[in-house]
Image: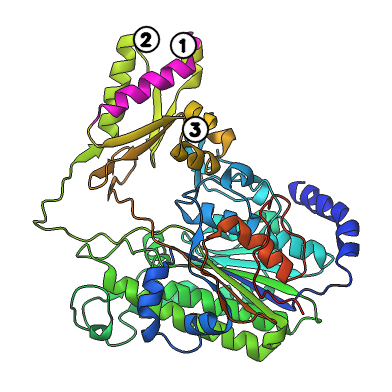
Amino acid sequence: MKIQFSKSILAGLLAGAYSIAADAQSPRIVVGITVDQLRTDYLEQLLPYFGSDGFSRLMKEGVYMPDVDFRHTADDEQAGVAVVYTGAWPVANGVASAEKFDSQLKRNVPTLAADPSRIKYDFSPEGVRLSTLADEFAITNGNLAKVYSLSADPQTATIAAGHAGNAAIYLDESTGRWTTPAYYGALPPVVANKNRTSPVGSKMASTVWRPLNVASTYPMGRVWNPADFSYGFSGAGRDTYLKFKGSAPFNSELTDAALDILKSLQNSSGQSAMLNISFSLAPIGFDSDGDSRPELVDAYMRLDADLGRLISALEKQYGKENTYIFLSSTGYAREPEIPEGNARIPSGEITLKKAESLLNSYLSASYGNGDYVVLIKNGKLYLDAALAEKKGIDIRKLRQETKQFLMKMGGVSEAFTIDEVAGGESRRAQELALGIDPKNAPDIFLYFTPGWTVTDDNSYPSTSKKVRLASPATPAFLFGGNVAPETVTATVEATALAPTIATAINIRAPNGAAAKPIAVNSGKK
């Protein structure tokens, strides 16, 4: 019923939208690309080492925006992709992060989980509260266009496919097979055929990640030799597939799948199509020595080659004049973990389980026994509002006392209550307000002291992360059609990407995109 309801809404919008755009044609093929944690500084340092068909070509022949500002609203891939595709901040689009707090279940659940209570999650775009570029593309083309997305992550794929997409394709780490949420129905035949004839699991035993080129020629980082890293993916279990999805070779697997889909789309009856691909350049989580810079450099090199394959195939199959590509980072980047040795940088450790225990003890002394703190995760603290109401405690007062206690803890540098964020009492509060979903906002936002290690020992297995506040510039590109080469030197707000892309491909901007298109050579004749 949910699928029919969503499709009927889109059909109702169709008549008016289609008549407005009837005399303006979209490109034959639109390819949207997001690259998780793509950094401008790394990109420009590695430019001399890239081939001529990938990033270099995007820079030379397209519009290059080296500084796209997500205003600290994105701290994971899902939030960043939602900003790119909706043209709106998380406060409006509903995707503030990969997880949201479920007050009934009293735990974090995937933001786009169709039914959070189930053990194995399915996903739905209904949690994306606005239309997306994919939706508007489908509507403008009379719902006849094919719209697909490809990603390692199901939620990222779902955001990019939108409400009107045909399939949000991702690799299920429990089976090693490409799949799509039930919301979209069946996989496209070409992908279903890949599962039968060339399943990812059949390649694992022979897949080894070694440096693509002679590693000693790579810049950025320590001196190493070509055999300095080598990762195998033998086995067929969940851990193997998760490891593979977090590696550079998986970007190549995505590219292979994309090329198969593009070939099948070319053979269709002349209809327009949109293919969205989500790559990753996140530092790997399974290096043995705590320094993944060599692997990260190699990941950039490999992705450059994959982009070259993709651009060349598009040009050969459709012609550059019939193709439009947009590529964006997800607006944030985490530094690889690098051992600091005897640098004597001020540091410490805060463990979340201990912080939660101390805080509950403090609040119990004031208000009577109880577990007032339900969850502390990713810098967000949730109080038990139902318990506070039962005890007749003013929740605003409880938040303030919680904040004051937290500020006395070693390792906590700043804390804001949701009331302060909603009031926009400081620049930091205003930025936080853009990046939250008001319907699922935490009670307290925490900022930990740079240099300290935050250990989340409430989760299994426990995780530890050293705090760094570096915020590198992140880029975006527009390429194809009649796009003329241009470098935009000014900072571009991330919410301006969607209306700019929409103008270039002759569709409406997503319904929550309030920013104006930026003035670039964007494909208009």
- Residue at which label 1 appears: 393
How many neighbours does mark 2 have within 10 angstroms: few (below 14), some (14-19), or many (20 or more)? some
x, y (%) of residue 172? 51, 61
| Alpha carbon separation for disc pair 3 and 2 | 25 Å
- Residue at which label 2 appears: 367
- Residue at which label 3 appears: 421
Q: Residue at x 27, y 79 (%)?
A: 219
511 left or right, relative to 297: right
| Alpha carbon separation for disc pair 3 and 1 | 21 Å
Q: Are marks 3 and 1 in contact (CB under 8 Å)?
A: no
Q: Quadrant for residue 381, please give it.
A: top left
Magenta highlight range: 390-409
Q: State yes or no: residue 376 in magenta.
A: no
Q: Residue at x 33, y 64 (%)?
A: 284
Q: State yes or no: residue 393 in magenta.
A: yes
How many neighbours does mark 3 have within 10 angstroms: few (below 14), some (14-19), or many (20 or more)? many
